[in-house]
Image (cartoon, rainbow, N blue to C red):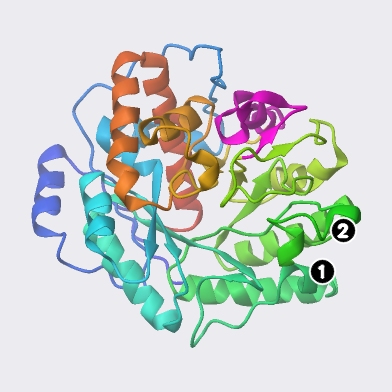
């Protein structure tokens, strides 16, 4: 993947305005990832008061995100919030998607739906999206697990077998294959793959587990085997400059319902010391770009909150020493979130220690952003949390060549 080696300069407020006025119409070349800095602001950053302990995991600013702290703090509140939102784009850009990206200064998108135009068309679409908000260092993501979950198809994108079939490949062969999948994503200017699946599905539940087992999305029932396979996929993608996202922490292997289309999905088995957490622990100790948190509830970890809103669940990742991006499962269209007001979904996730919100319903973006902005205006600790999360997102963008911190 081609990466511009020129280190971008820091934009002044005036220069930022000129870029926003004059540069939006100019598409970013699809062969070269954007490395522009989000515009700076002269507004003083929020107070650095420590976050309140209740349902709010304490953020840390240690390597590798420390180099991005100043950049994140220099952003306006609106730009910080935009960095924390990933909007779903289904096929061509419609009015709602364009409005969400531009009005809310969105810094990331995920390509949804069956997009079969191939590598060239995907790169062109990503460039068109990036041009809507050229100073956000746009990060594009996709679901390229394989099998039934492969969003990007067409010329240049090989058919990826399901994880159940990948599990039968020798590890070296799987890593080589993952490298080729990552190479295609890189050519399409996709920096983040929302894969691999780290969920361990017990053999006894394989036919009853709606989200993973029934769909062949898992690598099996043995935590060690799942760990080995998720690790080589993560490595293969990283070798081609594409960050991987291990999902769905702390695992959907023990549930029967699918949170995409069912409410009240509860795991009554998984604990903080369960062997099934091994793939996630190995991933955060390795080269994974992000960890996706499930929207199920885990009765033996935090029975009072869905995982995406649980400081206990997200805090476990931080206890393991992980300081990378924690990304939500969809907080937009998923049925499991319908009882939560749209204005509170991003607020609750970020307050619990999450960093990047996936929103598959672009029309809800304004409400989500407004909720976060309102909370930040009345809660200095929450406002500071946004700065830390924005730094993590910028660090991820630097990892995949979309940004340059410092």
Q: Is residue 275 above or below residue 320?
A: below
Camera sees residue 405? no
Instruction: Residue 176: give x, y in percent of width and height.
Output: 72, 75
Instruction: Residue 213: give x, y in percent of width and height.
Output: 77, 60
Check if mark 2's residue and mark 1's residue have beta carbons within 8 Å.
Answer: yes
Please tell me which residue is depicted at 11% across the width and 45% down the height of the picture. 17
**Are there few (<14), some (14-19), or many (20+) residues within 10 Å of tag 1?**
some
Residue assigned mark 1: 167
Instruction: Residue 145: give x, y in percent of width and height.
Output: 63, 66
Looking at the rendered image, the quarter that the C terminus falls into is top left
Residue at far bottom of view: 155
Q: Is residue 63 above or below residue 26?
A: above
Q: Which residues are magenta?
A: 296-320
Which quadrant would residue 367 be assigned to in this image?
A: top left
Camera sees residue 368? yes
The disc label shown at residue 225, or none: 2
169 drawn magenta? no
State the residue in front, 375 or 227: 375
Dot 2 falls on a residue whose secondary structure is helix
Dot 1 falls on a residue whose secondary structure is loop
């Amino acid at each position: 993947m081609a990466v511009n080696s020129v280190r971008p300069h820091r934009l002044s407020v005036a220069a930022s305005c000129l870029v926003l006025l004059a540069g939006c119409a100019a598409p970013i070349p699809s062969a070269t990832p954007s490395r522009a800095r989000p515009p700076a602001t002269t507004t003083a950053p929020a107070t650095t008061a420590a976050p309140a302990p209740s349902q709010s995991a304490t953020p840390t600013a240690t390597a590798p995100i420390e180099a991005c702290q100043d950049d994140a703090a220099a952003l306006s509140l609106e730009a910080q919030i935009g960095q924390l939102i990933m909007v779903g784009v289904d096929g061509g850009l419609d009015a709602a998607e364009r409005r969400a990206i531009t009005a809310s200064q969105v810094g990331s998108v995920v390509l949804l739906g069956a997009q079969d135009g191939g590598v060239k068309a995907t790169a062109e679409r990503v460039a068109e999206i990036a041009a809507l908000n050229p100073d956000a260092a746009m990060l594009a993501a996709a679901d390229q697990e394989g099998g039934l979950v492969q969003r990007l198809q067409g010329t240049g994108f090989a058919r990826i077998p399901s994880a159940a079939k990948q599990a039968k490949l020798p590890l070296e062969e799987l890593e080589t294959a993952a490298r080729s999948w990552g190479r295609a994503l890189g050519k399409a200017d996709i920096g983040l793959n929302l894969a691999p699946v780290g969920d361990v599905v017990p053999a006894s539940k394989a036919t009853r587990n709606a989200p993973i087992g029934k769909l062949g999305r898992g690598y099996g029932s043995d935590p060690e085997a799942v760990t080995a396979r998720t690790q080589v996929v993560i490595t293969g993608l990283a070798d081609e400059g594409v960050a991987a996202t291990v999902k769905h922490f702390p695992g959907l292997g023990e549930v029967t319902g699918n949170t995409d289309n069912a409410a009240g999905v509860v795991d009554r088995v998984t604990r903080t010391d369960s062997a099934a957490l091994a793939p996630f622990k190995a991933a955060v100790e390795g080269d994974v770009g992000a960890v996706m948190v499930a929207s199920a509830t885990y009765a033996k970890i935090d029975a009072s909150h869905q995982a995406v809103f649980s400081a206990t669940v997200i805090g476990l990742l931080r206890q393991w020493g992980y300081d990378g991006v924690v990304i939500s499962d969809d907080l937009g269209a998923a049925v499991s979130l319908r009882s939560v007001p749209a204005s509170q979904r991003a607020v609750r996730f970020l307050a619990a220690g999450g960093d990047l919100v996936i929103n598959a319903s672009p029309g809800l973006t304004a409400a989500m952003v407004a909720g976060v902005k309102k909370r930040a205006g009345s809660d200095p600790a929450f406002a500071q949390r946004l700065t830390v999360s924005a730094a993590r997102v910028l660090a991820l963008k630097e990892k995949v060549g979309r940004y340059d911190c410092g």
